[in-house]
Amino acid sequence: MDTSAAGPATEATPGDGTEWFGLDELLAAGQQSLTRLVGPTDTFFGQHWERTPVIVTDHPADAFADLMTLQDFDRILTEGPVAVQTLHAVNASRALPAEQLVHYRGNGGGPLADPGKVLDAFAAGATLVLHGLHRWWPPLRRICQELSSVLSHRVVADAYLTPPGQTGHLRHYDTHDLFTLQIAGSKHWRIEDPTVPLPLSSQHNTPERLGPSTVHFDGVLRAGTSMYLPRGHLHTVSSRTDTSLHITLGIEAVTWKDALTSAVRSYAEQQHLPWRRVLPAGFARPGATDRQALPEITEVPPYEEMVAWAQERFWRHEYRSSHAGRLLSMISATPGGTDTGAGRATPVRRAPGIVVRARLSGDHYVVSVDDKDIRLPAAVAEDVRVLLGGEPVRAQDLPSLSEKNADALLRRLLQEGILRIAHS
């Protein structure tokens, strides 16, 4: 995968007419984060991606302290409400019943974990698992966002705290690739080659799929070590004489099966009649064959259509832009809402961590962020391009618009979260 292929921020995708803003910056950050975890990315994609593990041991012990620390984990457990569905206590692959961790129910928000009961479970040998940290822990949200941009697959984050001498999960394989980052302490990993190559999400662990295999790695990952583990690799993980904290960044990938299935569904929904016809009457009878109907459906969605579907799904539904600072920008954009409101001399710039897609569509210039489309008059397209270029811009720097229209455009883009006030 060559992320250097992304062109200038306003370069249109060939044959598609879409203009991209903010993508180059995001890809650069994502490339840096991926290199941090696996080393040279050319080697990673050429030799290891979906094939073999990568273990990087040359980081200092505190290499990932910017993402999470033991102190952070403690604060999350003890200082804020944690919904039970985001926390599991696990011992030897068996999760404690949620009711054993509950103290009281939130006001309509579902059951909350009791810190005392959770820590008692840890003292009794349970591994504590915090799920979904990519949604609400800012450092992990950021790195997942960056990695997603480079991989074009959604990345999610969980954290595992294991007491000394314990095994949270027995021998198993995952149906998604993952990165693991050892934050504190150490863990012993025994990794075996897959018995089910590249398992699908539906191919769960069963006794017949957990047969004997060849050991690929048997050793200790210490604090500061990162690893890439392709799906299907069997592994057994246990802590040693110290408490272990590690993070997993799971890759929720889109397979060719997913792309083909969705493209065929789209074909059928778009009046492609052969795919909407029923199987021949009586097809379920033993020996019944009617191949005359088959030639009509031998046309399958082309490669370009499958990739286009996957791209649309990723940018509209999987990738989520940052909203940090949006509220203050919205307030600033409200006339009379604050004495620090945005005026004609107030510089604004494209919001950090946001990827904007834009295209001309008839009389409109459609600006899209995630799954939201904002339809603007086509006449303001060039002014919007200036505003999204990445540099600070003021309303008075848009000479093609009247003062009233320039102010209205800036206010709209501030309220939509596409622009932020550019603080010096």
Image (spheres, rainbow, N blue to C red):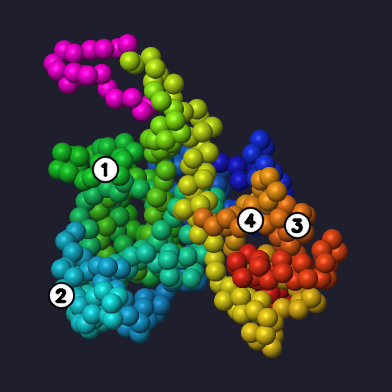
Quadrant in the picture for residue 125: bottom left
* Mark 4 residue type: Arg
Q: CA distance from mark 1 to mark 2?
A: 30 Å
How would you classify the magenta stretch by its main secondary structure?
Answer: loop
Instruction: Give the crowd class for mark 4: few <14, some 14-19, many >=20 residues within 10 Å.
Output: some
362 or 222, which lies in front?
362
Badge nearest the viewer, 2 or 4:
4
Q: Is residue 385 magenta?
A: no
The spot of residue 371 in percent (x, y) is: 51, 55
Instruction: Give the crowd class for mark 2: few <14, some 14-19, many >=20 residues within 10 Å.
Output: few
Query: Please, what secondary structure does the residue beneath circle 2 have?
Result: helix
Q: Is residue 8 left or right of residue 325?
A: right
Q: Which residue is mark 2?
A: 100
* Mark 2 residue type: Gln
The spot of residue 360 in percent (x, y) is: 69, 47
Q: CA distance from mark 3 to mark 1?
A: 48 Å
Badge nearest the viewer, 3 or 1:
3
Q: Which residues are magenta?
A: 275-292
Query: Please, what secondary structure does the residue beneath circle 1 have?
Result: loop
Q: Which residue is mark 1?
A: 202
Q: Residue at x 46, y 66 (%)?
A: 140
Q: Residue at x 27, y 80 (%)?
A: 106
Q: Is residue 125 left or right of residue 223?
A: left
Q: Which mark is residue 375?
A: 4
